[in-house]
Image: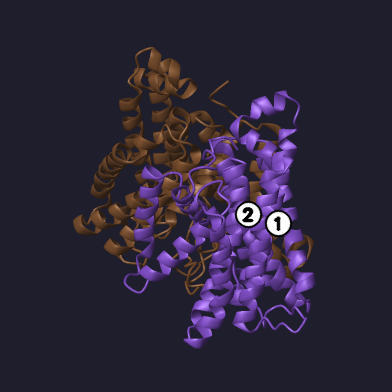
Amino acid sequence: MATRPRLSWLPRIAGGVYPDPPLGYNPRGREIEPTERRQSTMSGLFLFEQGLNGLQFGLMLFLLAAGLTLVFGIMDMINLAHGSLYMLGAYLTASIAEASGSFLIAVPIALVATALIGMALELAVLRKLYARDHMSQVLATFAIILIANDAVRMIWGAQPVSLNTPAALSGPIDLFPGMSYSAYRLTIIVVGLIVAALLYLLVTRTRTGMLVRAGASNREMATAMGVNIKLLFTCVFGFGAALCALAGAMLGPILAVQVGMGEDILILAFVVIVIGGIGSIRGALVGALLVGVVDTMGRTFLPMILRAIFSPVVASNAGPALASILIYVLMAAVLFWRPQGLFPARG
Amino acid sequence: MPRILPWVALALAIAFPLVAEQFDLGFYVSFASRVMIYAIAATSLNLILGYGGMVSFGHAAFFGAGAYTVAIAMTYGLDSAWLAWPLAMLVAAAVALLIGALSLRTRGVYFIMITLAFAQMMFYVFIGLKAYGGEEGLNLPHRSVIGFGLNLKDDASFYYVVLALLVGTLVLLQRLVNARFGRVLQAIRENESRMETIGYATYRYKLCAFVIAGTVCGLAGALIANQTRYVNPNLMHWVISGDMMIMIILGGLAYRYGGLLGAIVMLVLDEAISPYTTYSKFVIGFVLLAVVLFAPRGLAALFDRKTATQPAKAVP
C-alpha cells in the first residue's frame, strides 16, 4: 500500500480549505518495500511471513509503549510529546547516517542525543506539569508537538527525509528452504527481542527496576520510603526517549521519515497501553504484540476474506476501512471486559 | 463581564455584514462565519470539558460525522437544511452515544486516550471508505437549501444563520448549566464519589452531557461542510480535536463565552500570523504553552472574576 508522501500534515483550520495532501492511509506511514508481500502466495508460508511482519511491528510499538507506560504509571502524567521524540530520533539517525555514511554509528549517537533532549524537555517543561490536571498536561504536550513539528520542518524541510537500509542488510535471506525474508526486518525482530528481554531483566531483577516498579504502584509510598522520585523520573524519561529513538531509527528505513510520523504511531501506542494496562511493562509487551499482529494480519487477510465471501468491489470498498478499525474493536473489547487493561500495575 | 457587553457584541455582529459590504470586505464575512462555527464546536466541548470535567480528546469525530452526513445526504439528493442538519445532529448523537458509553467506563488518562483512539478510528474509516471519496473527500455541489427566501449561497445570509445558531448554542449552554442537570454535572466534576454515594447515577449524567455535546458539535460539522462545500477525513483528525481544546483553554474553561472567545483568538491569531510565516503553529504552540503554564484559567477569567468556577480537575 504505497501512498503519497505527506508534505504538510497539519490541516489549516483558519484557511477553511484543506489544501494539504491528505494523510497517508497506512497509520504506519508509507511502506517502501510493498512488493515483498505480493510475491508470496496464500499459503502457510505467507501466513508465517505476515506473522513475522506483525511481530516486527509489534516489537517496535513495544519500544514506544514501554517508555510511555512508565511515564504514565509513575507520574500519572499523559505525554503526547512522546511521538515527537520518536520523530526526532528518526530524523537525527537519518542526518547522522548521511553525514557519517554509517547506520551503525548513527543509531547510538541518535539514541544518546534524543535521550538528552528528552531529559532537557522533562526538566524544562514537563516537571512543572506533574501537579497539574490532565487537561493541562494534554494541552502543554500538544503545544510541544506543534512546536516540534514546525521546528523539524524548519530544520529538515517539509519533504520526507530518506534513510536507507544498511547495505549489508538490504537483501532477503533464506530462513529455511522456500522461505526468504527481509534481512533488515529480521534484524528489527532480533533487536526488538533483545531490548525487550533486557528491559524485562532491568525492571524485574535490578534495584533501579525495583524503584521504578515501586514508583509505578504507589508514588507517595515510594517517596515516603526515601526514593528520589524526581531524579528517578528524569532518568526514566530519558530512557524512554532513547527507546523511542531506537524505534524511530529502526523503522525509519521501512517507513517514511516525515513530519507527523510520530503522531500516527503514538495513537497506536496509546491503544497498546489501554489494552495492556497503565504502568505495566508486561502489559505493554503483550498489548504491543497483539496490536502489531492483529493490525498486520487484518490489513492483509481481511480484504482477501471479503473478496472470497462477497465481491472484489465490496472488498476494495470496505476492506481497508474494516481492517483499520480492527485494533480499535480489540481495544473496545478489552475495555468492556477488563476496564483496567490486561495487566494493571495498580491494584 | 458587564451585562450589557454580550448585547453590544451581538449588535455589532448583526451590523458587521452590512458594514463589511460597504467596504468590500466580503472575505471577512466568510471568515467570521468560520469563527462562529468553530465557536459552536468549542462551546459544545466546553460543556463536557469545562463543566463536566471530562477531558475528551475526540471531539473532532462528531464534527466530522456531522459534516459527512450533510455531504453524503447531498449525494443522495437530500439538500434541505431542515432535514439534513437535524440528520447530521442525529448521526453525531449516535456516534457520541457509542463512543461515550464505552469510554465513560474509564477515567483519567485512560479516558483521554480512548476518546482520542476512537476519533482516530473514525478518521481511518473515512480514509478507507472509497465510496465516499476516501482520503480525497467529497465536494458538495451547493450549500443546503433553507427556504423562507433565504439563500445560503449568499455569504451574508449564511453568516446570519450561523450567528442565530451560535446564539442558540450559547443560550442552550447557559440554560443547561444552570438547570438541575448542569448543577449535578458540575458537582460530579468536583467529586464524583460523593455524588454517587448520595444516589446520583453519575454515569448516566456524564453520558447524557457527552451526547448533548456531540449533537451540538454535529451541527457545527454540518455548518462547516456548508461553509467550505468540501469535506474530507482531515475534519476528524485529532489536530482538530486539539484545536478545539486549545480554543477552550485560551478562552476559559467553564465560562459561558470561553468557546467563543477562544475561537476568535485562535483563528484571528492564525489568520494574522500566516501571511508572515508558514510556521504559524510554531507561534501558537508557544502561546499555548505559556497560557497553560502561566494563565491556566484562560482569557474569560480576565473579564470576570466574580462568577468564576474552578477549572476542571482531572476527573472525567
Give the camera-side residue of B2 and A288.
Answer: B2
Q: Is residue B177 above or below residue A279?
A: below
Q: Colour of chain B?
A: purple
Residue B303 in percent (x, y) is at 46, 51
Residue B63 location, quadrant = bottom right
Residue A41 in percent (x, y) is at 61, 59
Disc 2 and disc 1 on one polypeptide chain: yes
Q: Which residue is mark 2?
A: B44
Residue A339 in percent (x, y) is at 65, 33
Q: Chain of mark 2?
A: B
Pointer 2 with pointer 1, Cβ within 8 A: yes
Mark seen at residue B215: 1
Q: Chain of mark 1?
A: B
Residue A22 in percent (x, y) is at 52, 69
Number of disc labels = 2
Q: Disc 2 or 1, which lies upstream in sequence? A: 2
Label 2 packing within 10 angstroms: few (<14), some (14-19), many (20+): many
Q: Colour of chain A?
A: brown
Label 1 packing within 10 angstroms: few (<14), some (14-19), many (20+): many
Q: Secondary structure at mark 1?
A: helix
Is residue B235 something that shows in the picture? Answer: yes
Q: How does the figure colour the protein chain or chains?
A: by chain
Q: Residue furthest left?
A: A100
Image quarter (top left, top right, bottom left or bottom right) of the N terminus of chain A:
bottom right
